Amino acid sequence: MHAVIPYVTAALLFGLGVYGVLRRRNAILVLMAVELMLNAVSLVFITADVSIRGSQLQASAFPNGEPGYSGAVFALFVIVLAAAEVGVGLAIVLQYYRMRRAVHIDEVELYYESDRQVTR
Amino acid sequence: MTVADVLLLALGAVAVGSGAAVVTTSHLVRAGLYLVVSLGAMAGIYLVLGAELVAWVQVLVYVGAVVVLLLFAVMLTRAPIGASNDLDRPAWPARIVGGGVGLGLAALLTDAFRWMRYDLPAPGTAERMGAEIFGQWVLPFEVLSILLLAALVGAIVLSRPDIGARNGDEP
């Protein structure tokens, strides 16, 4: 296994995610692009984990016991974080849609017309 | 080039290709379906790398739950069926920043790892992974469960109009 293949895949996916976040103006599509970025990060975690476990290092290089699996654990954590993020994000998007009948993020007003008071 | 390399290249091409389709297509529903293909290819990469548990969690949580949630949101916001032409903002800043980040990271990682060969370790087992989560990483795990609870409460408070809404917001 050449570790550079999944690493470059992850880098390209992250770039695509950044492109999507900057390009899209529909909030749901922005969330999808964020999912791509999070996935790229967990792919980096998994690849680092596997290549450290597969490398022929001496046991003395790992004073805290057998190496590995931390990357996979953190990939699981990233998946959980993504689930939490998309839950709250979609709640915000749906609430905004209920108030304004639109999901375009470049038209979000930072103050309300009704009370002319800057909020958030 | 071993079998694992060929599989990684093929699955990576599928993941990047359908990821590109996610951020460029003008059909909202198709973007969600391309996201399924991309995340499925990533799960395949995890399987090839031997991280079985993460691969199946990816299929269950991402493809099963997150994408369904996104498609629900697409439908609840009355997205038009078919192509829509108001999904995008001007392309050039996004192209420059996104392409710069992607290609820059790719160049950095290529320079760091060259064509170095690693042996694939024995596939990880769920038992070993559970020992790792509940041994070394038990504190982050607990913090994460509190975060999930907070996200749940936050989503409920946000989506109920009778609590947490300011005066005058009601339609």
Image: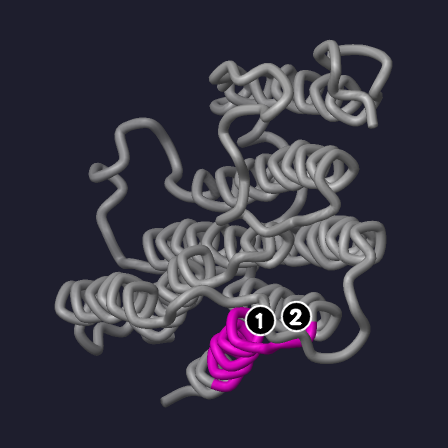
- Give the tally of numbered discs: 2
Q: Which residues are magenta?
A: B10-27
Chain hosting mark 2 = B
Q: Which mark is residue B22?
A: 1
Where residue A113 appears, x then y in whole percent? 59, 26
Residue that carries the numbered disc 2 in the rendered image = B31
B40 to the left or right of A59 = right
Badge 2 and badge 1 in a common chain = yes
Q: Which mark is residue B61?
A: none
Quadrant of residue B34 in the image? bottom right
Decide whether residue B17 is among the magenta residues.
yes
The one of B42 and B102 positioned closer to us in this rendering = B102
Dot 2 or dot 1: first in sequence order is 1
Q: Residues within 10 Å of mark 1 (few under 14, many from 20)?
A: many
User: SS at mark 2?
Assistant: helix
For the point 77% across and 62% down, which residue is it?
Answer: B79
User: SS at mark 1?
Assistant: helix
The one of B133 and B38 positioned closer to us in this rendering = B38
Quarter of the C terminus of chain B within the rendering: top right
Where residue A89 appears, x then y in whole percent? 63, 37
Quadrant of residue B1 in the image? bottom left
Q: Is residue B171 visible?
A: yes
Callout 2, which amino acid? Ala
Q: Residues within 10 Å of mark 2 (few under 14, many from 20)?
A: many
Callout 1, which amino acid? Val
Q: Is residue B134 visible?
A: no
Cβ atoms at labels 2 and 1 below 8 Å apart: yes
Cα gap from disc 2 to disc 1, whole angstroms: 5 Å
Q: Main secondary structure of the magenta part?
A: helix
For the point 45% across and 64% down, which residue is it?
Answer: B89
